[in-house]
Image (cartoon, grey):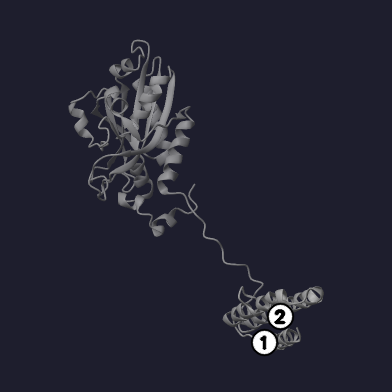
């Protein structure tokens, strides 16, 4: 017992004389005296050898010893912090901290939200569907039966486990699912990601994003389609944007057209983006084919409709003059930071 008291007194003198000058020495002090295998723990383990009538007295002594070591550790921490601050007097501790880096939406998300906002003001609701689609909704129901030559227009990713399923090649499949469940009037836009088996380059990618629209009601005309798209272009690209329609072909619309706008880079004078024509194609459109309406038990004698579809990447390219599709999916923060502050 006497020997143990002398040992504790020696440890106290050692602790009292301890000094540290850096964080490593402070941690070494904590481990030596207060660590799981430190001197305080080893002394407290001697409690089992103390006679029963002395344990209360010895317990109080051990608690005082532990508290003494903990107080010394706190004092050394404060002294170490003070010396660190004193070593760099040029530091002004009243200055605010470093600002947090502000995040941003992806440019495709920005443009998608703008497109959705414009069409919502015209009464279009947003509809979404699965990215893994069956052949019926992606092709057959849209007037593209098996072996139809127009299927070659879209190089498709089929699933090995079940060739009847595929990664959707357009968001027209969402239109098909809505017409399957809902009776006219139908007025929807369908934003989403689509997939096509194409070689990745500055002008093409194996996945991209579309927004497609559908309006089915009684007495819907091509004039309604044109006025809807005129409004969209003026809101998206400004009042000075010029528009033209060219005849085209799509299996699910008749008549069909492609819509061009005056080039946003050269203002219609001619550049590499517009191939020196002054015009850039931004979407395809047309009146819904009667056969497509019949596929969903909608009477083409009572209802008509129009549909349109555009690539968000193309709209984003024209708004921000982005000349490489690969930039959208490379997660390069230098590219993304350019859109900080955009809505």
Report x, y in % for residue 134: 31, 29
Using the rendered image of the protein, determine whether residue 238 is visible from the camera's viewpoint. no
Q: Considering the numbered disc 2 on the image, is that residue within a helix, a strand or a loop?
A: helix
Q: Is residue 328 left or right of residue 79?
A: left
Q: Looking at the image, which residue is at 34% across and 44% down?
A: 313
Mark 1 is surrounded, within 10 Å at the Cα level, by few (under 14), some (14 to 19) or many (20 or more) other residues, namely few
Please name whichever residue, 152 or 187, is drawn nearer the observer in this view of the structure.
152
Q: Which residue is mark 1?
A: 18
Q: Is residue 118 left or right of residue 158?
A: right
Q: Considering the numbered disc 1 on the image, is that residue within a helix, a strand or a loop?
A: loop
Image quadrant holding the N terminus, namely bottom right
Q: Looking at the image, which residue is at 57% across and 80% down?
A: 24
Q: Looking at the image, which residue is at 63% across and 67% down?
A: 96
Q: Looking at the image, which residue is at 48% across and 36% down?
A: 117
Report x, y in % for residue 67: 74, 76
Give how far apart the Cα atoms at labels 2 and 1 are: 9 Å
């Amino acid at each position: 017992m006497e020997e143990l008291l002398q040992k504790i007194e020696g440890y106290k003198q050692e602790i009292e004389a301890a000094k540290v000058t850096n964080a490593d020495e402070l941690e070494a002090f904590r481990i030596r005296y207060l660590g799981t295998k430190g001197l305080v723990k080893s002394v407290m383990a001697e409690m089992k050898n103390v006679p029963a009538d002395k344990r209360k007295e010895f317990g109080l002594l051990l608690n005082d010893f532990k508290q003494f070591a903990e107080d010394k550790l706190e004092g050394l921490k404060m002294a170490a912090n003070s010396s660190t601050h004193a070593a760099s007097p040029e530091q002004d501790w009243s200055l605010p901290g470093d600002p947090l880096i502000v995040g941003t939406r992806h440019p495709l998300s920005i443009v998608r939200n703008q497109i959705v906002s414009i069409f919502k003001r015209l009464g279009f609701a947003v509809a979404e569907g699965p990215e893994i689609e069956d052949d019926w909704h992606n092709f057959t129901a849209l007037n593209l039966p098996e072996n139809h030559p127009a299927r070659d227009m879209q190089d498709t990713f089929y699933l090995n486990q079940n060739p009847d399923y595929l990664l959707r090649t357009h968001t027209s499949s969402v239109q098909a699912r809505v017409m399957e469940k809902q009776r006219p009037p139908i007025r929807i836009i369908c934003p989403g990601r689509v997939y096509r088996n194409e070689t990745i380059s500055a002008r093409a990618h194996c996945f991209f994003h579309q927004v497609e629209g559908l309006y089915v009601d009684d007495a819907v005309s091509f004039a309604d389609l044109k006025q809807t798209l005129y409004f969209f272009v003026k809101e998206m690209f400004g009042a000075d944007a010029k528009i033209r329609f060219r005849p085209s072909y799509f299996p699910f619309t008749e008549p069909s057209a492609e819509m061009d706008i005056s080039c946003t880079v050269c203002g219609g004078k001619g550049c590499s983006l517009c191939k020196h024509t002054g015009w850039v194609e931004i979407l395809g459109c047309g009146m819904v084919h009667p056969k497509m309406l019949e596929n969903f038990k909608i009477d083409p004698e009572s209802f008509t409709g129009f549909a349109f579809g555009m690539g968000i990447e193309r709209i984003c390219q024209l708004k921000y003059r982005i000349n490489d599709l690969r930039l959208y999916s490379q997660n390069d923060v230098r590219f993304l930071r350019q859109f900080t502050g955009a809505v």
